[in-house]
Image: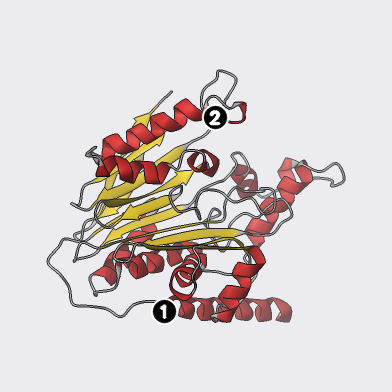
Amino acid sequence: MQNRLNRRGFLSATAAASLATLAVGAAPPRPLGARRPLVVSSNPNALEKTMELIKQGLDPLDAAIAGVAIIEADPNDHSVGYGGLPNEDGVVELDAAVMHGPTHGGGAVASIRNILHPAAVARLVMKRSKHCLITAEGALRFAKAHGFPEMDLMTEESRKIWLRWKEKHSEDWLSQPDGQVDPKVLETLKTRIHGTVHVSAMDTHGDLGCVTSTSGLAFKIPGRIGDSPILGAGLYLDNTVGSCGSTGLGEVNLLNCSSYLIIEGIRRGEHIKDAMVNACKRIIETTTRDPRFRNAEGKPAFGVNFYGMTKEGEVAGACIGGGGTFSIHDGDGIKQVDFAAVRA
């Protein structure tokens, strides 16, 4: 019992220290402007904090990073940060990227281990280095140099999920009968998790910021990097045009530079929803040539979602697959917006 208490105390202290590092690299607040603020997210739990900080005059990127940090620290979200499902070796590897509208700056980390808030590290890559992307051991050393503490990102539940997956995919491990396994573990393993959190934010001056953070594809090959930390694929913005990001299978966004494609479509005069729908159609057209991404009927065997806003405050989302809703905060409250569903 004493060891368990010590571990719990250590994790609490480490998490508190990591939260304190969220202020490293953040800009000081400035007086509010006249524009109506707006936040778009794949996860509604990030919206309230982001909007609260924007209303306090924080930079839109800093506010978005603080909103995403809530999801990164949530042990019950198995697709992002603490409690995220690990690679096939049982190690949690995180990817994150940020872009800043006023400076058109961007930064990212990929395959970073043992750091609770990779999005905040990505901001430091943008602000404290001459690079856009740092990976793996180099990213960890960079984070530690700026005061980010290391911590074990596996929870007891995520460990059990990984262990069950390992037992089912190894000739040398023996698995327990289903009746002896936690039903929540079995339910989680029915589908392969590859979720992500994205936030696009506009402040009261009309300036934009966006953030994406993920633990990537569950049980991936160690070192696999998806679209989330790749500027132009998993997220993109231009302060004169708009901001967008994506969740879903990263490989198809990497092959199509999808987020850049959307922002450039808006720049050319397309409505934001049309730009997103056209990006979905492009993905379908290109990736259905590749048998890795097709099912037996030749249709897409993946899902992709896009979320975003224009400089004028228009919002839209589009997805390949079944539709649904995403969340926005318009300064008055959280609202749900329908995806435009695109099917092959």
Q: Position of residue 228 (x, y in %)?
A: 49, 52
Q: Which residue is mark 2?
A: 301
Cα separation, mark 2 vs mark 1, equals 41 Å
Q: Is residue 309 left or right of residue 232?
A: left
> Amino acid under label 2?
Ala
Query: In the rendered view, would you say 329 is above or below 317?
Result: below
| SS at mark 2 in the image | loop
Residue 296 quadrant: top right
Q: Quadrant of the C terminus?
A: top left
Q: Is residue 212 above or below residue 250?
A: below
Query: In the rendered view, would you say 103 is above or below 195?
Result: below
Please state which of residues 189 and 113 is positioned toward the viewer in this rendering: 113
Checking the image for residue 154, the label placed there is: none
**Along the horizontal axis of the image, is 145 left or right of 2?**
left
Question: Residue furthest toward the left?
Answer: 34
Give the amino acid type for the residue marked by disc 1 in the picture: Ala
Badge 1, how many Cα within 10 Å: few under 14, some, many 20+? Answer: some
Instruction: Return the residue found at the far top.
Output: 297
* Residue that numbered label 1 is attached to: 23
| Residue most extreme to the front | 130
Q: Nearer the viewer, residue 77 or 110?
A: 110
Circle 1: element type:
helix
Left or right: 124, with 55 as reference point? right
Q: Is residue 328 above or below residue 114?
A: above
